[in-house]
Each structure stands twice: as structure tokens, then as C-alpha cells.
Image (tube, rainbow, N blue to C red):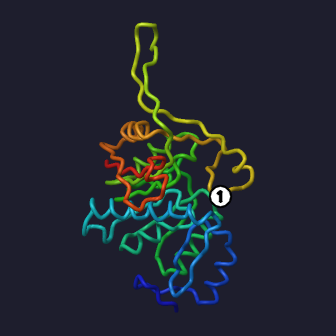
């Protein structure tokens, strides 16, 4: 048994952990598995800080909203990838479920949880059918680094809202704002528009089998105002873009990525 700093014990031996790290390479996240074991991400070192900033902002928002209630919260990590955030939430005493569309991601996530001694449940699923698949709500939902990879953002956000009992935290890449007036039936009839959704072609990465793309090659990236409007239309009562910490990843610091808290 391997003692883990968070107070949990690994169900895997040192040899099994070492073999698992090698088996599932390349890694996307820098997982600290305890007792000196860790994974090395294949992405450039300076980009890894995206994950640290996300986690710090999620933890701060959760602590501010839930306070001591965090112990025992039921959390759903949507698009959990390798389980980085799901395992982190379990360390705070939450009951966590992670879902992801790719089985290859879930294999890594299950290994990380087992090596860390985290009792996280993982299963395959897609955000597009989330409400039907789950049939229930969770106190906290995480939707991190996923929205800008999906083909139908409103469908996905409505699904996320339907399974959120209290609070959702969304992290996404964003594009610059576009505002103006659109003719609406006649030259003299106009409607103001605020925000934009940009269409992104991920065909190259998608066809190459990149695990960080969505399940289709067309992606959609909102502007900040579009994100807030869509969250409201999806069923959240209010939403707020959070301020990044002083040491935030450079994209978060420049407002090219945002972390947004939304409440039912």
C-alpha cells in the first residue's frame, strides 16, 4: 500500500503505478500520484499552467460558495479527461463522478484515481445526452475546457444546467466581442446583438486522433458576453465571470480564457 499525502492509500503497488505511468503515456496532465510518483505532460511546460489556474479558481469559487458544506457534496465532472479535477475534488471530501466521451481518457482517469487512492467513479458518456443519461442533479458540476470543443453549445449548456442542482463552474477559451445592430425584418427594424460564437475547424487535430478535441471536428467558441447570455438561456438564474489570480496562466490573465460560475 502507498501512503498518499491527502490521507488516502493507493490500491496499487509501486511497481503497478510505475508500469501504469509508462503504459498510458503520453499524458496531458501533471498528476501527482504521491510517494514521488507523477506524470509528465506532453504539452509544453509553459502551457501546463492552464490546469493549475483552472484548479485554483475552481477551488476558490467552491470554497466561497459552499464553505464547510463542501464535505459530502455530490460533484459531476463533465468531460473529465484524465480525472485531474475529479480527483482534486475528491480530496476535498466530495463524492465525485466523472464522465468522458473517450474510453482512452477514462482508462487513464481510473488509473490516476486508483494510484491516488481516490474513490472517484468514472463512466463513458456525452454532454449532448447528459440529462437523459443521468436522470438526476448534482450539487456541483464542472464543465472545464470542453465548451469550446462542442458543435452545439446551447444543447450542451442546457444539458449541463439540467443536471446542476446548485452551482456549475465553466472554463473555456473565448473570442473577442462583436457588438452592433442587426436588421430584423425590415431596414428600420433592428435588434442589438452582444457577443458572438466563432466556428472553429478542428479537423486536422480530430482526424489525427487528438484526445483534446471534441467528438466532432467543428467546434464553437463564445465571446464572454455570449457565454453569459447562453448560460442564462440554458436555465441558470445568474452567472459571473471570475477574476483570475495574480499568478494566472497568461491566457486567463489576458481574458482569452475565462472561468465562469453559474447558479441555478
Pick the residue in front: 74 or 93: 93
The image shows a total of numbered marks equal to: 1
Q: Secondary structure at mark 1?
A: loop
Q: Give the residue pinned by disc 1.
A: 211
Left or right: 27 in relation to 89: right
237 sits to left or right of 109: left
Q: Residue at x 48, y 47 (%)?
A: 256
Relative to 229, does residue 24 appear above or below in the rendering?
Answer: below
Image-quadrant location for residue 245:
bottom left
Left or right, residue 194 beside residue 130 = left
Q: Position of residue 212 (x, y in %)?
A: 62, 56
Q: Find the residue positioned furthest to the right.
A: 208
Residue pictured at 41% horizontal, 57% vertical? 141
- Image quadrant of residue 89? bottom left
Residue 127 x, y percent position in the rendering: 52, 50
Q: Which quadrant would residue 231 be assigned to in this image?
A: top left
Residue 93: give x, y in percent of width and height: 36, 74
Instruction: In the rendered view, tell whether residue 6 sits above or below residue 58.
Output: below
Q: Alpha-carbon neighbours of circle 1 within 10 Å: few (<14), some, or many (≥20)?
A: some
Amino acid at each position: 500500500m502507498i501512503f498518499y499525502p491527502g490521507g488516502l492509500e493507493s490500491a496499487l503497488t509501486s511497481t503497478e503505478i510505475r508500469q501504469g505511468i509508462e503504459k498510458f503515456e503520453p499524458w496531458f496532465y501533471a498528476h501527482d500520484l504521491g510517494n514521488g510518483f507523477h506524470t509528465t505532460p506532453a504539452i509544453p511546460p509553459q502551457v501546463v499552467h492552464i490546469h493549475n489556474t483552472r484548479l485554483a479558481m475552481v477551488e476558490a469559487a467552491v470554497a466561497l460558495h459552499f464553505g464547510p458544506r463542501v464535505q459530502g457534496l455530490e460533484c459531476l465532472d463533465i468531460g473529465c479527461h484524465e480525472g485531474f479535477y475529479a480527483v482534486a475534488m475528491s480530496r476535498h471530501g466530495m463524492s465525485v463522478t466523472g464522465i468522458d466521451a473517450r474510453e482512452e481518457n477514462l482508462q487513464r482517469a481510473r488509473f490516476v484515481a486508483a494510484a491516488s487512492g481516490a474513490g472517484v467513479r468514472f463512466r463513458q458518456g456525452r454532454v449532448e445526452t447528459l440529462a437523459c443519461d443521468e436522470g438526476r442533479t448534482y450539487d456541483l458540476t464542472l464543465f472545464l475546457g470542453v465548451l469550446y470543443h462542442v458543435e452545439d453549445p446551447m444543447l450542451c449548456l442546457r444539458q449541463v444546467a439540467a443536471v446542476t442542482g446548485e452551482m456549475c463552474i465553466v472554463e473555456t477559451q473565448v473570442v473577442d466581442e462583436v457588438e452592433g445592430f442587426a436588421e430584423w425584418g425590415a431596414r428600420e427594424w433592428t435588434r442589438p446583438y452582444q457577443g458572438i460564437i466563432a466556428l472553429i475547424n478542428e479537423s486536422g487535430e480530430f482526424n489525427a486522433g487528438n484526445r483534446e478535441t471534441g467528438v466532432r471536428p467543428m467546434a464553437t467558441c463564445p465571446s464572454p458576453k455570449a457565454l453569459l447570455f447562453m448560460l442564462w438561456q440554458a436555465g441558470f438564474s445568474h452567472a459571473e465571470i471570475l477574476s483570475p489570480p495574480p499568478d494566472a496562466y497568461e491566457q486567463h490573465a489576458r481574458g482569452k480564457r475565462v472561468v465562469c460560475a453559474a447558479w441555478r
